[in-house]
Image (cartoon, helix red, strand yellow):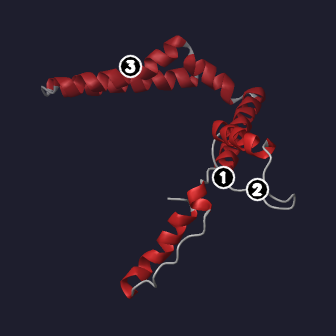
Amino acid sequence: MIAETVCSAVAAAGLGIAVITAYRKRYLTATRIAAYALVPLGLVMTGVVEWLADTAFSPVAWAGFGVLGLSWLMFATTRTVERRRGGTRKERKAAREAAAPAATSPAATSPGASAPALGQSARTQSPAPRQKPAAQGDDDFSDIEAILKKHGI
């Protein structure tokens, strides 16, 4: 009951301010103020304010908000873990499917040898040709070149 009274008083005060603003020939601003002033009155008339007041003092409602918060936390955690693992489910599934034919085909490697990395071609598996020592100005980019070569770029 108090909430409805406060909302009605806020609406009345807002409409009064809108009338004063319209008297000063600022009709657009007066209309905007009147629109904002009618929102609390509309919430009271639709019963939203009463529902919020009942919800605020209900332990079951607060438990429901806690469950929603836990659900959101679990969702955010799983998304974070998925991103740290490197890719989405579709990307991991495509990588497994690409690795499956290579694993089942007879290879000329010993049983103790490690599996080759995915996506490497014969060109990138061959030993890299020796490069000349880098000049002093190229030292800044040697780390970047090494990272790019490591990823096959």
Tell me the residue that label 1 is attached to. 84
What residue is pinned by disc 3? 38
Relative to 23, say whether 94 is above or below.
below
Residue 8 position in % (x across, y down) = 45, 20
Give whichever of discs 3 and 2 has the lower sequence position: 3
Q: Can residue 20 be seen?
A: no
**Which one is nearer the viewer's eye here, 55 or 95?**
95
Please, is residue 4 above or below residue 70 in the view? above
Picture quarter containing residue 67?
top right
Q: Distance between the residues labelled 3 and 1?
A: 49 Å
Q: Which amino acid does label 3 sit on?
A: Leu
Report the mark closest to the observer, 3 or 2: 2
**Residues at badges 2 and 1 in contact (C-beta under 8 Å)?**
no
How far apart marks 3 and 2 lie (CA) works out to: 70 Å
Q: Is residue 101 above or below residue 35?
A: below
Which of these two is toward me, 18 or 101? 101
Element marked by disc 1: helix
Residue 10, numbered circle = none
Which mark is first along the chain, 1 or 3? 3
Residue identifier under label 2: 115
